[in-house]
Image: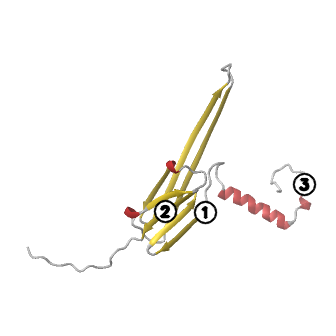
Amino acid sequence: MFELTPFTHRRLAQASPLRVSREFDDLIDRLLWSGADHHQNLRDFDLYEKDGHLFLSIDAPGVNPDELEIKTSKDRVSIRSRKDSEEKNASDDGKTWYSRKSAYSFDYEVSLPFEIDTEKAEAKFENGMIHISAPRLVVSESKVLTITKA
């Protein structure tokens, strides 16, 4: 890949306009769509309705299901996970230390095309996928009231 650095051994004349355009596209994609080392902003997901139920499946490889927090509202689903870990090790002489810290975050929100019944929403985690299902919220347009005499 042609790197966009001030010190390169390639001559600019060797780069075709198409290649330069592709390199700029790759650079913009990396700047806009990639986060920290262990954070991915975009996830693949499927969202569809079948028989009055909403079905949402989101890729979440490497995520521990015990660390997931899934919140539903009538028109949105929010999925969050955060894991911090720290590893320290000392040598036998007690002078040399090894320390490593890592963090992983997963923060995803999906707007739904219609309102769902949050009381009946369900979630499960299977083979690195989060599966959420919920029935469509049925709101009656009108209701005939019976008058009672006091």
Q: Name the residue tied to disc 2.
A: 132
Kindly identify the amino acid type of the residue bearing the numbered disc 3.
Answer: Arg
Say left or right for 42 vs 110: right
Q: Earlier in the sequence, mark 3 or mark 1?
A: 3
What's the distance in space between the residues labelled 2 and 3, CA to CA?
50 Å
Q: Can you tell which mark lies on residue 131?
A: none
Residue 73 percent location from the top left of the image: 42, 62
Q: Residue at x 79, y 61 (%)?
A: 23
Q: Which secondary structure lies at badge 2? A: strand
CB under 8 Å between callouts 3 and 1?
A: no
Q: Residue at x 50, y 48 (%)?
A: 66
Q: Residue at x 9, y 76 (%)?
A: 149
Looking at the rendered image, the disc whose residue lies closer to the viewer, 2 or 1, is 2
Answer few, some or many: residues within 10 Å of disc 1's Cα (few below 14, many 20 plus, some between 14 and 19). Answer: few
Residue 112 percent location from the top left of the image: 48, 68
What's the distance in space between the residues labelled 3 and 1, CA to CA?
37 Å
Q: Earlier in the sequence, mark 2 or mark 1?
A: 1
Q: Which secondary structure lies at badge 1? A: loop
Q: Which one is in front, 121 or 76?
A: 121
Q: Quadrant of residue 128?
A: bottom right
The quadrant of the image that shows the N terminus is bottom right
Q: Is residue 2 above or below residue 49?
A: above
Residue 108 percent location from the top left of the image: 54, 57
Q: Name the residue tied to disc 3.
A: 10
Q: Which secondary structure lies at badge 3? A: loop
Answer few, some or many: residues within 10 Å of disc 3's Cα (few below 14, many 20 plus, some between 14 and 19). Answer: few
Q: Can you tell which mark lies on residue 44?
A: 1
